[in-house]
Amino acid sequence: MTDYLYEYKKALRNGDEEEANKYYRKYRGEESEEKKETVEEDQGEGQEEEAEEESVEEKVSDPADMTVGEVKEYVGDNEELAEEILELELEGKNRTTLVSYLEDKA
């Protein structure tokens, strides 16, 4: 297991979605710290709000990349997140156990 994947799972267990997503993106090779810092430095005040809105949307991980247990841990008690993950799951793997669980949470 890579360090990023280990840190990702650790952050999920601690309920820190932002930290988990950061390590997940690194694990997938989608974003480097240097790139993120450069983007943040270049943004003006008006653009910061847009970036925050985009980062909220990016927080939802694809449930297909996780086990049922990991998705349950990721969702926790967050009803809105459960709804978003449910939509993604229905479009993706459509696992009946997970769909049932997410419907109960939403």
Image (tube, helix red, strand yellow):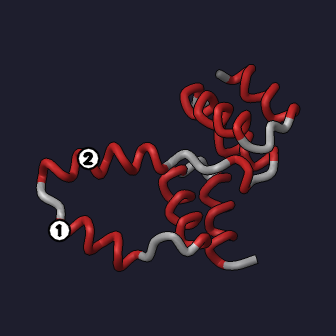
How far from the left and from the top, in percent, is residue 34? Answer: 35, 79
The furthest residue to the front: 91
Amino acid identity at mark 2: Glu
Q: Nearer the viewer, residue 42 or 75?
A: 42
Circle 1 sits on which residue?
Answer: 42
- Asked if 82 appears above or below 72 in the picture, the reply is above
Which quadrant is the C terminus positioned in?
A: top right
Question: How crowded is the residue under tag 2: few (<14 C-alpha within 10 Å), some, or many (20+)?
Answer: few
Q: Nearer the viewer, residue 75 or 44?
A: 44
On screen, residue 82 versus residue 56, left or right, reads right
Amino acid identity at mark 1: Asp
Callout 1 secondary element: helix
Residue ID at (19%, 69%):
41
Circle 2 sits on which residue?
Answer: 50
- Asked if 89 appears above or below 12 in the picture, the reply is above
Which quadrant is the N terminus positioned in?
A: bottom right
Tags 1 and 2 in contact by the CB under 8 Å rule?
A: no
Callout 2 secondary element: helix
On screen, residue 27 versus residue 91, left or right, reads left
Question: On the image, which quarter does residue 82 sit in?
Answer: top right
How far from the left and from the top, in percent, is residue 70? Answer: 75, 49
